[in-house]
Image (tube, helix red, strand yellow):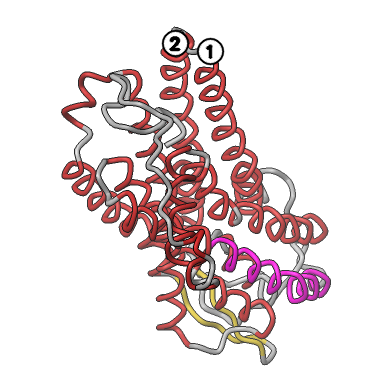
Amino acid sequence: MNVSFSHSVLSTSHSLFTTNIQENNEEPTTYDYDYSAPCEKADVRQIAARLLPPLYSLVFVSGFVGNLLVVLILINCKKLKSMTDIYLLNLAASDLLFLLTFPVWAHHAANGWGLGDAMCKLFTGLYHIGYFGGFFFVILLTIDRYLAIVHAVFALKARTVTFGMMTSGVTWVVAVFASLPGIIFARSQNEDSLSSCGPSFPVGWKNFHTIMRTVLGLVLPLLVMIICYSGILKTLLRCRNEKKKHKAVRLIFVIMIVYFLFWAPYNIVLLLSTFQEFFNVSNCKSSSQLDQAMQVTETLGMTHCCINPIIYAFVGEKFRRYLSVFFRKHIAKHLCKQCPVFYGEPADRVSSTYTPSTGEQEVSVGL
């Protein structure tokens, strides 16, 4: 019985070396589903070995810099004074945790896996925890915006730093539990002198894990976004400030569309790859095409962690001002010590004002 992989990065990397793991622990061999001839996937292997390392490296560098800036600004400038700041910090932390595994997957795609079972489980766990944590904190940020704008009176009491820290702690625990199947079934394997790291699921667990990832990673976030942003839009459409209303409405649609475009393709391919026989794509040609599609959609989805800092932080007017102050104070001043312009602190001009809909001085939707 064929058991394929449902972990996107690990499944892509692992499929370069072995695409069929026998449930009875026999030596893995790759056969077409008509059992008449081996299903060779040399092209998939070669393309991944050439393209994935530079792509993973690019995502790692850009995502790491962006999310690290978010962390530094939230801690040094904003001082974590609101529940939104707490959720943004945890979102950036989950993205950083997710990104820290990328150099390993880049090496894996090019040279195989040579770090053993323990390291395979470790990096698989870090990947999954960051992966699920990112989705969960996107959901919390969406609910936070909904409360701040639609239920402003209740939000004044509920949106506290303490409550933000408590819910963040619970969220990390849930992310760990959601990651356990991928960690437990991860293992290092060898075939044809090439080693690989990936989850080896029994067929029941494989199906469960794919459905769980699709529900938690796509269906649930989109459902929460649709419900919350529908309420936000109704409230904003009653706003008298046309300029702020249009900016907020545009931002809401950007958040939803970007999220869907980045993650929906991967989840669709994941479902097709897991349930190949059900969708009648279990022949060798279709299987190879799904592997290639997994590589493309996987990389597209992973780049969403680079977009998060832009969507949830840098689009906010206050955050851009903090970024400017941080650059002047900590970077530009050291690069040009003789430039007096970097020694003067700009006036603390805040374009947003305290409003009942936010309960704090920040742009109501742009953070």
Q: Is residue 48 magenta?
A: yes
* Residue located 47% across and 17% down the image: 233
Question: Residue 273's x, y, as percent?
Answer: 65, 53
Relative depth, front residue between 3 and 109: 109
The location of residue 164, given as percent across then percent down, is: 23, 43
Up the image or down, 112 lies above or below 298; here it is below
Horizontal side, residue 239 vs residue 14: left or right: left
In space, the residues marked 1 and 2 are separated at their CA atoms by: 7 Å
> How packed is label 1: few (under 14 Cα within 10 Å), some, or many (20 or more)?
few
Q: Is residue 4 left or right of residue 217?
A: right
The residue labelled by disc 1 is 242
Does residue 148 belong to the magenta stretch? no
Q: Which residues are magenta?
A: 38-63
Please give the residue where the numbered disc 2 appears in the rendered image: 239
* Residue 217 % position (x, y): 48, 45
Q: Look at label 1 and name its amino acid.
A: Glu
> Which of the image's four quarters has the C terminus?
top left
Horizontal arrangement in the rendering, residue 119 relative to residue 270 (left or right): left
**Local secondary structure at mark 2:** loop
Whether the residues at callouts 1 and 2 have beta carbons within 8 Å, the answer is yes
Q: x and y percent of residue 47 in the render?
A: 80, 71
Secondary element at tag 1: helix
Tag 2: residue type? Cys
